[in-house]
Image: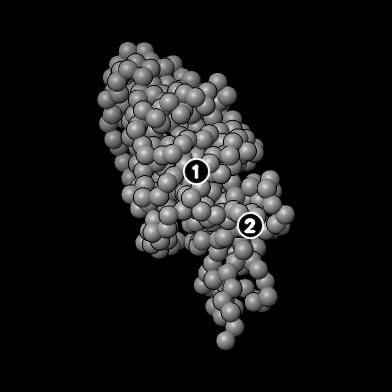
Amino acid sequence: MSKKKYCTGCGVLLQNENITQEGYVTNLESNLCQRCFRMKNYGDYQVVTKSNEEFIEILKSVGKTKDLVLHIVDLLNLDKDLGAIREFLPNKMILVLNKRDALPKSVKDEKIIEYIRSLDLNYEDIVVISANKNYQIDLLMKKIKKYKTSNRIYVVGHTNTGKSSLINQMIKNYSDLNQELTISPLPSTTLNTVEIPLDQKLTLIDTPGLVDRENIANYVNSDILKKLVPKKEIKPKTYQIRKGQCLVVDKIFRIDYVEGARNSFTFYLPNGFKIKKMNATRQTILKDLAKTTYTLKYREDLVVNGLGWVKVVEKCMIDCYIDKNIETFTRKSLI
Ligand SMILES: Nc1nc2c(ncn2[C@@H]2O[C@H](COP(=O)(O)OP(=O)(O)OP(=O)(O)O)[C@@H](O)[C@H]2O)c(=O)[nH]1
Ligand SMILES: [Mg+2]
């Protein structure tokens, strides 16, 4: 019987029997499954819908080890990415806040760390990094060496937070390996654990990300998906708005200003999205989407899960229209 072989890009079990099933390769000599090969070479993204149960089982098995865990969070989706993971993992953990490059430079790392500390979560340490820009990866490595309990370090988090991107950066920085994990703007790129021995003393283990069903990434086409992952520093866009006006983001999201004094709305969204200010009474666009009414207090954010947020200065009442599956919520202003 031949030995089982796994894809070096996403961890899936390789097979050459069924082209419609995951892990397909024409030749079992290959190291990459066909899906990874197409993503890497042609940017051709194929969505895989897997049940979260499988990913949760993997997390639980990590929870049975005593190994150090890195919890990777996307800074643009902080509140949601922080949730759900900890409950499966009693391990020692470092919180890694990724995609620093996408946040405005004017926001200081200390301020973000202070915000997290105020939530009183149970982490050994917190590090702000950018996997793509190789920012503070050395600092993270120092902390890993400080807190590690064995030679094995697990990398966990929600999907698309940049776990595989971080490991690829560490492979480049600290090893002679030429392996490269598959990364993509699509949810569920990594499908199974992948072990990366950086050296004799340190093995990083990539894991599939937990899928948040209320995240916008599950409900948009691939063009919008690509726009959701910011490539550059987000340029906040501010609009002065008064009662009777509305703000519309592409064809996905609309806010009507229902009640309140003249106000300032600042959008923190990836730069590719277009925002239009219009007269609400004359404009019917997106009004067939699910409506939620929010009463905002002084300096609060309206967050759209997976997209970004709108910072509102004065207290007011707004109606928000968006696909019914996509979650919106409010919080104290982050910035
Ligand atoms: N701007 C920015 N984008 C990043 C950074 N790190 C990762 N990304 C992007 O985020 C997207 C997801 O990255 P992946 O590394 O595939 O994320 P993952 O956590 O491994 O995702 P799953 O395997 O699906 O769980 C890709 O489009 C990356 O280019 C970063 O530091 N900055
Ligand atoms: Mg991955």
Residue at the disc numbered 1: 147
Q: Which mark is residue 200?
A: 2
User: CB of residue at label 2: within 8 Å of ligand 2?
Assistant: no
Viewer can see residue 79: yes
Q: Quadrant of residue 38?
A: bottom right
Residue, x 58% and y 79% (percent of image)? 3
Nearest to N terminus: mark 1 or mark 2:
1
Disc 1 crowd, CA 10 A, few/some/many (<14, 14-19, 20+): some
Q: x and y percent of residue 323 in the render?
A: 37, 44
Residue, x 39% and y 33% (percent of image)? 303
Between 282 and 63, the residue placed more toward the observer is 63
Q: Quadrant of residue 289?
A: top left
Could you tell whether 117 is left or right of 31 in the image? left
Viewer can see residue 74: no
Disc 2 element: loop
Disc 1 element: helix
User: CB of residue at label 1: within 8 Å of ligand 1?
Assistant: no
- Identify which amino acid the numbered label 1 is placed on: Tyr
Q: Is residue 172 above or below residue 133?
A: below
- Identify which amino acid the numbered label 2 is placed on: Gln
Q: Quadrant of the N terminus?
A: bottom right
* Cα distance between the residues tagged 1 and 2: 17 Å
Residue, x 54% and y 49% (percent of image)? 163
Disc 2 crowd, CA 10 A, few/some/many (<14, 14-19, 20+): few
Q: x and y percent of residue 315 in the render?
A: 30, 18
Residue, x 63% and y 47% (percent of image)? 170
Q: x and y percent of residue 101 in the render?
A: 59, 33
Q: Is residue 46 above or below residue 278?
A: below
Could you tell whether 213 is left or right of 6 in the image? left
Q: x and y percent of residue 194 in the render?
A: 55, 61
